[in-house]
Image (cartoon, rainbow, N blue to C red):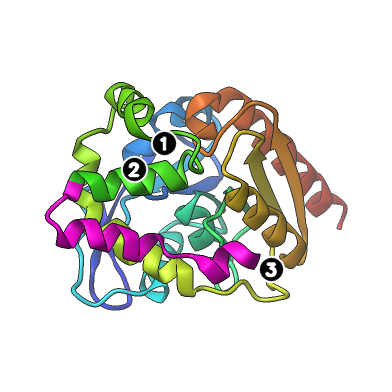
Amino acid sequence: MQTVTSADETRIAYERHGEGPPMVLLHGDSIGKEYWDAVVPHLEDDYELTISDRRGRGRSEDSEAYSLRREVEDARAVIDSVDGEPVVFGHSFGGLQAIEAAREAPVSAVVAYEPAILVGEYREEAGLASKMQERLDAGDREGAMKRHVEEVIHGGSLSGEALDAWLEEWPVWPEYVRFVENSVRMNRALESYELPETVDVRAPALMLTGTEAPSHLRDGVRAANEAVVDSRLVEFDGLSHMGPNEDPERVVDAVRSFLATVDAAEKTA
């Protein structure tokens, strides 16, 4: 494990795997960089992967003060730690980190699987953070995190006994519950974030989504695809918000195809 210091002096932990051109992997609202375990074997033979823990997750430090800006600065610090201009690949909240960091950092390409961007009526009425906080205030930490999983991963399609049965098979449950305060503050920041009309990312971008993902995340990724200056969208039939874990080979194949076009464009420029 290595660490890099973010702008507010918080130490962000990361690991490196593989050899080749640099790629940074940014996880979403998971317990840490382990989110990428299913993806790494499909990439490490061809890329030098830098995989970080978000602040307050895994082995990274945390701070009392919190904001989306600090998380973006964390991603920027990790990006700056690699040699050259990396591909930045983020999932969910990590996808939003990747997009925002790439507005400032020198990167060769951006890949975002369903970046956590709220748009339209859903954003106007968003209240997940307060719903989770109510359960936390009542001492129900597990219930608060179940509310998060129900809405963010399943879009309300699973609840009650069906959700409990799904959680019993989910490898990170119940360890995931210990990050509930982090998830509340993250959701609060996301509810305040407004996607600019134009996002000037100075690199080609690939937005990914699955047909079985919650509708509000599919709306968000489409909006991001329209806002980011040079972006294209790929949709995976049958995959959910956890697509990179469900079918890493199919997701990585799409990423490789996109990066091949980026490389070809650079050679002919």
* Magenta stretch bounds: 120-141
- For the point 18% across and 50% down, the residue is 141
Amino acid type, residue under disc 2 in the picture:
Lys
Picture disc at residue 33: 2
Mark 3, secondary structure of its residue: loop
* 85 or 191: nearer the viewer: 191
Asked if disc 1 and disc 2 are in contact, CB closer than 8 Å, the reply is yes
User: Looking at this rendering, what residue extends furthest in the right direction?
Assistant: 268
Give the class, few, some or many, for how many residues have Cα within 10 Å of label 2's Cα (few <14, many ≥20).
many
Mark 1, secondary structure of its residue: helix
Question: Disc 3 or disc 1, which is closer to the eye?
Answer: 1
Give the class, few, some or many, for how many residues have Cα within 10 Å of label 1's Cα (few <14, many ≥20).
some
Picture disc at residue 36: 1
Q: Which SS type dominates the magenta stretch?
A: helix
Q: Position of residue 123 (x, y in %)?
A: 56, 67
Give the class, few, some or many, for how many residues have Cα within 10 Å of label 3's Cα (few <14, many ≥20).
some
Q: Position of residue 64 (x, y in %)?
A: 18, 74
Q: Is 258 placed left or right of 59 in the picture?
A: right
Location of the C terminus by quadrant is bottom right
Q: How far is disc 3 from disc 1 in space, using C-alphas?
A: 25 Å
Amino acid type, residue under disc 3 in the picture:
Arg
Q: So how many labels did they put on this image? A: 3
- For the point 73% across and 40% down, the residue is 234
Figure quadrant of residue 214: top right
Q: Which residue is mark 3?
A: 202
Up/down of 161 relative to 189, above or below: above
Mark 2, secondary structure of its residue: helix
